[in-house]
């Protein structure tokens, strides 16, 4: 086992120990200096730590106190080694402080402290940040944000996005994902995954943990992490080692929003990530009322069509009783999905998010 070297908080000069020894024996400094054959001022400087104990001093002190001279020589050597360690520790801390000052405006310090992954000590935090952002050197950190622009596929139309907080959130999900083990992923089980998730969502009991368990059994990692301040991020999808991974913030505690966002990221997995494991998709403020990239539109269509069959939906949306609670419940029962998903889809299609339909939509 490798022993961790710890520098002392203070180096103890052998002169302090000598003073304690003389006091215990009730020997005055003047009396002892005469016995050693040195000037009292010279002995006083040793006691005050202004002068070191030489090999000659060690022999004389040892003889005068009837102790082994090596004891005093070793005390002097230990003091000098401790001084070196303390100076090295101080230098390391000064370097770490300088490094933190260099990157502090590029690190979501408040968010990472809140999540308990850094503690404000730059000596500990700097190595973690390098590992967190997968940096060989700190100078590479700005490139992380330039790279993220190419992955930021859907941007908020309602909120400004703090990109530093955003990448902190994404990288914390990646770090968490790297520590999770799930089953082997099989892309041919797409339909089984979809049906299992829809069944769990329809039951809506311990839904998030159930979905995590289902996805893990099919080789997909699902991580839930609350979004930071000024960062209206909904989801991210990427490849973690040999497994596709979904990260969700679940900003809205509604089953319809959770379902759509989950299936949207699932769409990225089966439509995009399988063919390109180097890509990732970061989605901000999921909205379907403006034009996005082809990949985002495909993920939207995947979510909508796999939650509600397109043909079935067209028939329902054109029916005269579509806004009646009983019609929604009957339609949901027919499709074996949660009725809040029907209500949420109606709200979007009719561009009305305050429909007076009494259907419970909280996540169970």
Image (tube, grey):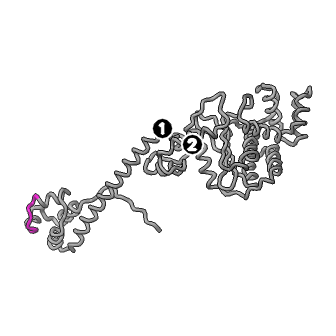
Q: Determine whether the residue tagged by mark 1 lies in a helix, strand or loop.
A: helix
Distance (Cα) linking label 1 and label 2: 12 Å
In percent of width and height, residue 232 lies at: 63, 34
Q: Position of residue 205 (x, y in %)?
A: 77, 46
Kind of element beneath mark 2: helix
Question: In the picture, residue 4 is in which quadrant?
Answer: bottom left
Q: Which residues are magenta?
A: 35-41
Residue at 24 percent across and 60 percent down: it is: 13
- Quick one: 275 or 304, which is closer to the camera? 275
Q: Position of residue 9 (x, y in %)?
A: 34, 55
Q: At 60% from the left edge and 38% from the top edge, which residue is drawn?
A: 149
Q: Tell me the number on the disc at residue 168.
A: 2
Q: Residue at x 65, y 55 (%)?
A: 241
Along the viewing direction, whichever of 238 and 234 lies nearer the viewer: 238
The numbered mark, 1 or 2, whose residue comes first in the sequence reads 1
**Residue tagged 1:** 105
**Quarter of the image where one finds residue 226:** top right
Residue 39 counted in the magenta span: yes
Instruction: Please give left or right for residue 264 compared with residue 127 in the image.
Output: right
């Amino acid at each position: 086992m490798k022993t961790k070297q710890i520098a002392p908080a203070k180096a103890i000069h052998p002169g302090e120990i000598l003073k304690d020894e003389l006091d215990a024996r009730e020997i005055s400094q003047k009396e002892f200096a005469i016995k050693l054959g040195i000037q009292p001022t010279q002995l006083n400087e040793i006691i005050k730590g202004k002068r070191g104990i030489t090999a000659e001093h060690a022999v004389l002190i040892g003889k005068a106190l009837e102790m082994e001279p090596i004891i005093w020589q070793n005390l002097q050597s230990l003091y000098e080694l401790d001084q070196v360690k303390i100076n090295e520790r101080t230098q390391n801390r000064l370097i770490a402080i300088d490094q933190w000052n260099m990157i502090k405006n590029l690190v979501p310090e408040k968010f990472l402290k809140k999540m308990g992954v850094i503690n404000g000590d730059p000596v500990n935090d700097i190595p973690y940040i390098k590992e967190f952002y997968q940096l060989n050197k700190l100078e590479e950190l700005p490139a992380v944000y330039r790279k993220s622009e190419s992955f930021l596929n859907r941007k908020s139309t309602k909120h400004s996005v703090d990109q530093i907080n955003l990448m902190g959130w994404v990288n914390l999900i990646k770090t968490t994902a790297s520590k999770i083990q799930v089953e082997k992923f099989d892309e041919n089980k797409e339909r089984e995954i979809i049906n299992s998730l829809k069944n769990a969502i329809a039951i809506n009991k311990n839904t998030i943990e159930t979905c995590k368990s289902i996805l893990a059994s099919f080789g997909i990692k699902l991580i839930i992490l609350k979004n930071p301040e000024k960062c209206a991020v909904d989801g991210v999808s990427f490849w973690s080692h040999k497994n596709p991974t979904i990260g969700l913030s679940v900003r809205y505690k509604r089953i319809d929003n959770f379902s759509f966002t989950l299936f949207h990221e699932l769409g990225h997995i089966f439509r995009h990530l399988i063919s390109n494991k180097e890509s990732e998709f970061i989605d901000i403020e999921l909205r379907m009322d403006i034009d996005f990239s082809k990949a985002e539109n495909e993920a939207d269509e995947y979510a909508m069509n796999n939650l509600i069959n397109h043909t079935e939906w067209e028939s329902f949306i054109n029916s005269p009783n579509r806004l009646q609670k009983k019609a929604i419940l009957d339609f949901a029962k027919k499709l074996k999905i949660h009725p809040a998903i029907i209500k949420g889809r109606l709200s979007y299609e009719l561009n009305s998010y305050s429909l007076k339909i009494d259907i419970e939509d909280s996540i169970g």
